[in-house]
Image: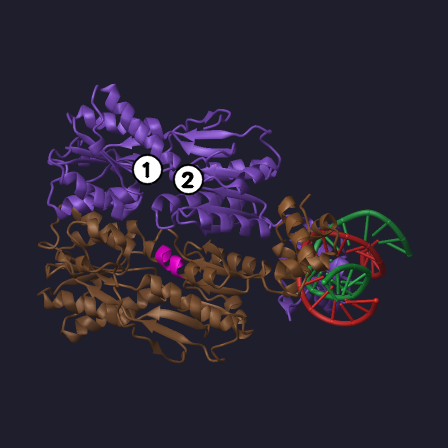
Chain colours: A brown, B purple, C red, D green
Amino acid sequence: MRTTIVDVARDAGVSSTTVSHVLNGTRHVAEPTRQRVLAAVERLHYEVNSLAQSLKSDRSQTIGLLITDISNPFFTALVRGIEDVANDAGYSVMLCNTDENPDKELTYLRMLRRKSVDAILMAPTGVRQPVVDQLVGLGFPLVCFDRLPPGAACDSVLVDNVSGAQGAVSHIIRHGHRRVAVVTGLLGVGTTDERLEGYIRAMAEHGLPVDPELVRRGNSCLAGGYREMQALLDLPDPPTAVFSTNNLMTLGVLGALQARSVHVPDAMAVVGFDDFEWAAVLRPRLTVVAQPTYEIGETAARMLLDRIEGRGGSEPRRIVLPTRLTVRESCGAAGPDHSAEREDVFGRPPMHVADVPLSAR
Amino acid sequence: MRTTIVDVARDAGVSSTTVSHVLNGTRHVAEPTRQRVLAAVERLHYEVNSLAQSLKSDRSQTIGLLITDISNPFFTALVRGIEDVANDAGYSVMLCNTDENPDKELTYLRMLRRKSVDAILMAPTGVRQPVVDQLVGLGFPLVCFDRLPPGAACDSVLVDNVSGAQGAVSHIIRHGHRRVAVVTGLLGVGTTDERLEGYIRAMAEHGLPVDPELVRRGNSCLAGGYREMQALLDLPDPPTAVFSTNNLMTLGVLGALQARSVHVPDAMAVVGFDDFEWAAVLRPRLTVVAQPTYEIGETAARMLLDRIEGRGGSEPRRIVLPTRLTVRESCGAAGPDHSAEREDVFGRPPMHVADVPLSAR
DNA sequence: TTGTAGGCGTTATCAG
DNA sequence: CTGATAACGCCTACAA
C-alpha cells in the first residue's frame, strides 16, 4: 500500500541504506546516485514513516500538551507561544483538552506515554496523578504551567497570583470601596487558592473584614460568574465592587450586571483576572490583572526543550512571571487608557524572572 | 530503558505471546497465568508502545486536525465536537493550527502523513495543495469543513453561507437601511466569497446598488475589522449599517464604533457572522448569523469515521448545515430576546441536511 | 493452554 | 563509495 524506502531503493536501483543516507545527509553519496534516488523519491511521492523512525531511534519529536479548557483564550494564546517554540525546534505538538476533568487527564497522560511523546507540557487539574509523580521521578521531561500539580515536585512556569490579586483588590479599596466581593474559580486548583489568598491579604492590609457572604465559588466558567453575581446582588447588603478571578467568570459577572441593569462602575466596580484581546470592545472597558500569556507558553516550552536536552540540572526549576494591573474604566478609576498606547498587552517589558528551587506546596 | 512486553513476559515467566493475548483479550489464557501477567504489568508500570503497534498494524488510531485559527472561538467550539466523536470511537486527535498560512498547512500535512495518521480533518486555507488532491485521489480518508479546498473534490461539511449572509443583509434592509456596508474576510477563502455573494444578492433583491466603497476587505482579523470600520466612518457619505462576515472582525468593528462614539444601533446598525458564547455580554447585544459550530465538528468527525471504515461510497459527500439569524438589539430591531430563552444557541432544532454530490467549484 | 518465529519500515554497524 | 544485516517492540500465523 504505502511506499517505503525499499520501493524507492528498487526504483533507483540502489540499496535502502543508500536511500536513507541520501535523505538524511548522513554520509557522502556519489552525485549521480544521489540524483537517481531523489528522482525516485519524487516520482513515488515517498515520505518517511516516522513510526518506524521513532521505533528505531526511541525519539518521536513530539511533545504532548495538556490544557484544561480550549475555549479559554488564556490557554489558546499560551498554546501559540508553545507551538512557536516547539516547531522551531523541530517538535510537533499533540494538543489535548482535559476540560478540568481528572479522568480525561489520566486517559490522555496514558495515551501520550503509549504514543512515546518525548516530553509533556501540562496545566494540571487539581487532582494528584500518580503517573505524573512517576514520570517526574523517572526524570521524564515534564513541565507544568499555570498551576502546580498537587504533590509532584516538577518544573513549572507560573505567575505571581497572590500579589497580582492583592494588587487588584488594593486598587479597588483605594478607590473607596469597603464591601468588596470575590468570585473564585474551581476548588482545589492552585490558582484559585492563590488569588483568593491575594484578596484576603489585601482586605487585611487595609483593615477590612472578610465577609464570608462576599466570597463566592464561580467554578471558572461563564455561567458560574453569572450565577454568583446574581447571588451577590440579591444579598441584603450587596457589595459595591467585585473581583473575579478568571476571564470567563468575569464575562459572566458582566452579563449578570447588565441583565439587572446595574451600572458599571457607578453602582458596581469590576476587576477581573486575565486580559484578552476582546476586552477592548467591552463597555465599560475592563480593569484586569493581565498575565503574559504568550510568554508563559514560550518560557514553558523553552524549559521543556532544556530538559529534553538534559540541561537544567536535577533540581525542579520554577519560573514565576509577573502580572500587570491594567486599569480601565470598569473600576471607576479611569485613568488615562494606557492599553491604547501599546501594540500588545505587554509591550517589551523587562521580564522579571524569579528562579527559585521548588519547595513542597 | 523503557519496559517492553518482553520484560513483562520474563517477569511473569511466560512468553511475550501470552502477554500480548492477555492484554488484548485475543485468546483464552488460563486464569492463574493471566493473573501473573497482570501483576507483572502492574509491577513494571507497563504501557504498550503504540508506535510498534501501529507499525505492525498500519493503523495509528490517530486523526490529524488542521484549523486555521486557534484563537477563533468558532474553531475551538468545533474542535470540541470533533474530539468528542473521535475519542468515543477510540481515536486521538492531533490538532494543528495553520494560522491561515499555506506553508504551515503544507508542512503539517506532510508531518501528518509521516506520522501515519489514519485520517485527516481540515479547514483548508485558500490555496490549492496538490498533496490534498493526491490524498483524496488515493482514497485516503479526508474531510474538509467550514470551507472547500480549491480544486479538490473531497468530502465536506459546510454551512449555507450565501443564504445566511443574504438573510442577514435582507434583515438590515427591511429595517430601512439603504447604505449597507460589508466587511469581508481573507481573499480567496470560499466563505469570504460566499458571504459577499449573499450580500450582493440581498442588495439586488431589494433593488439597491452595490457601492464599491462600501465593500471592504477586513482579512478575517480583529484589527482588520477595526481598520475598515474606521475607513467607512471617514467616507463622505458613510453607511448606516454594516455586515461583518466573521466574528473577530465584528469585534473590531464594534471597537472602532466605540472609539469614535458612534452609537449602535441608532447611528449604525451592526450584524455579524458567527455567534459566540460571549456575545451576550456585549452591549448592545449583537445580531448575528449563528452557525451550528459544535454540530459541524460532530458531523465532520462522523463522516470521517464512515470513510475510515470504508463506508460512504466512492463519490465525494457534502453536507450543508443551516445557519440561523439571531436577532438582537444591535440591528435596531430588538425584538424579544430569543437567545435568553434557550440553553444553547441551537436548542434541539431539526437538522436540515442537504446531501448532494460535489461539483467542481 | 502456551510458545516460536517472521515481519512491519527504519537506521546503525559492519563489511566490501 | 555502496550494501547486507540486525534490531527497535509488537502481533499473529503456525506449531506443539
The N terminus of chain B sits in image quarter: bottom right
| Extent of the magenta region | A75-81
> Is residue B134 toward the left or the right of residue B97 in the image?
right
Q: Would residue A79 be counted in the magenta stretch? A: yes
| Magenta span: chief secondary structure | helix
Chain ID for label 2? Answer: B
Nearer to me, A184 or A254 = A254
Q: Which residue is mark 1?
A: B345
Q: Which residue is mark 2?
A: B126
Q: Would residue B69 be counted in the magenta stretch? A: no
Residue B287 to residue A39: above or below:
above
Residue found 41% across the figure and 78% down from its top: A360
Q: Name the element at disc 1.
A: loop
Instruction: Give residue B198's position: percent from left, percent from top.
Output: 31, 27
Residue found 40% across the figure and 28% down from its top: B350
Instruction: Give residue A336's position: percent from left, percent from top.
Output: 11, 61
| Contact (Cβ within 8 Å) of mark 1 with mark 2 | no
Please tell me whether mark 1 or mark 2 is closer to you in this view. 2
Density class for disc 2 (Cα within 10 Å; few <14, some 14-19, many ≥20) is some
Q: Is residue B121 visible?
A: yes
Q: Which mark is residue B108?
A: none
Label 2 amino acid? Gly
Density class for disc 1 (Cα within 10 Å; few <14, some 14-19, many ≥20) is many
Nearer to me, B151 or A72 = B151
Q: Name the element at disc 2.
A: loop
Instruction: Give residue A296's position: percent from left, percent from top.
Output: 36, 65
Label 1 amino acid? Val
